[in-house]
């Protein structure tokens, strides 16, 4: 029986690459995201493997929308073996005091509350199914360790994801639910395109930063997901080798 995954933020970037990599590895995948057209483009890019997908327009900020995603996945595939909490957003690179409360709340709602709501539904499904259990992988980002300038909301939520990962790992232990986190730096996606043109550094200047092929990230997630439940990658950092992370600032 093919294993079943849910990937949030699957309409582009890391989410799309991961969904396709899981499909290529034989998984059945529910792709979740706010834009149905983007999800269908991901399915189309998967080629013949797209026949093992379910595309569900989902707003992770909305508990009812999240519940509908998990219900549809269960009804279609019968179970859930993997949740990749990947949906995320940021704010414009402006001084902290110029950010609006609405921008802060939107980032928290998508990056943190969305991951929590999906984790709740995954627990409910994974506890009840037979065989019991499953795996949750959270996209933490290198910002879970070190911020970029003018990214207070994003950085705060990614630090919080580390706490959620640890709490999920602990609370899932008795139910065969494993939880790990992948912290990703400078994967080549539309979101990081500006890095190829030059991005603000902590010392105030602009610098072009190296990026890595997003497929390396997707392959790493598939490796984490493919472990038996008796083993878990608790934290992984994958990054462009020459990006200015170690010694940043």
Image (tube, rainbow, N blue to C red):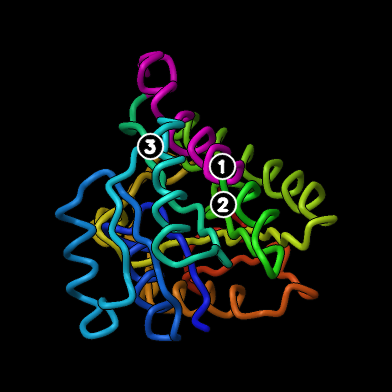
Rendered view: 172 above or below 118: below
Which secondary structure type mostly characterizes the magenta part of the structure? helix
- Write down the residue under mark 3: 65
| Label 1 close to label 2 by CB (< 8 Å) | yes
Which residue does the image show at 36% across and 16% down from the upper left?
Answer: 102
- Picture quarter containing residue 225? bottom right
- Write down the residue under mark 1: 158
Query: Which x, y percent locates residue 135?
Result: 64, 63
Rendered view: 27 above or below 86: below
Mark 3 crowdedness (10 Å alpha carbons): few <14, some 14-19, many ≥20: some
Query: Which x, y percent locates residue 54?
Result: 31, 63
- Write down the residue under mark 2: 140
**Bounds of the magenta segment:** 95-120
Q: Left or right of 75: which side holds 40?
A: left
Q: Left or right of 195: which side holds 185?
A: right
Which residue does the image show at 52% across and 44% down from the upper left?
Answer: 118
Of mark 3 and mark 1, the one earlier in the sequence is 3
Of mark 3 and mark 2, the one earlier in the sequence is 3
Q: Left or right of 160: which side holds 38?
A: left
Let me know if residue 150 appears in the view: no
Instruction: Verify whether residue 104 appears in magenta.
Output: yes
Spatial CA distance of label 3 from label 2 is 23 Å
Rendered view: 87 above or below 84: above
Which residue does the image show at 64% across and 61% down from the upper left?
Answer: 129
Query: Which x, y percent locates residue 161?
Result: 61, 43
Instruction: Verify whether residue 181 appears in magenta.
Output: no
| Label 3 close to label 2 by CB (< 8 Å) | no
């Amino acid at each position: 029986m093919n294993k079943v995954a849910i990937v949030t933020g699957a309409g582009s970037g890391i989410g799309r690459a991961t969904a396709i990599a899981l499909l290529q590895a034989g998984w059945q995948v529910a792709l979740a995201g706010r834009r149905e057209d983007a999800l269908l483009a991901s399915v189309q890019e998967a080629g013949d493997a797209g026949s093992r997908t379910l595309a569900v327009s989902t707003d992770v900020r909305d508990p009812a929308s999240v519940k509908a995603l998990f219900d549809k996945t269960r009804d279609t595939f019968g179970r859930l073996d993997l949740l990749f909490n990947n949906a995320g957003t940021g704010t414009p690179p402006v001084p902290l005091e110029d950010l609006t409360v609405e921008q802060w709340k939107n980032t928290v709602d998508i990056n943190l509350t969305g991951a929590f709501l999906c984790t709740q539904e995954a627990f409910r499904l994974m506890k009840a199914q037979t065989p019991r259990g499953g795996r949750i992988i959270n996209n933490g980002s290198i910002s879970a360790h070190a911020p970029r300038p003018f990214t207070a909301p994003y950085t705060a939520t990614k630090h919080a994801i580390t706490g959620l990962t640890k709490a999920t790992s602990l609370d899932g232990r008795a139910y065969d639910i494993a939880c790990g986190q992948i912290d990703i730096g400078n994967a080549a996606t539309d979101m990081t395109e500006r890095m190829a043109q030059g991005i603000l550094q902590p010392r105030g200047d602009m610098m072009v930063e190296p990026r890595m092929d997003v497929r390396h990230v997707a392959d790493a997630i598939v490796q984490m997901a493919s472990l038996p439940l008796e083993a878990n990658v608790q934290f992984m950092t994958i990054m462009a080798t020459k990006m200015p992370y170690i010694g940043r600032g």
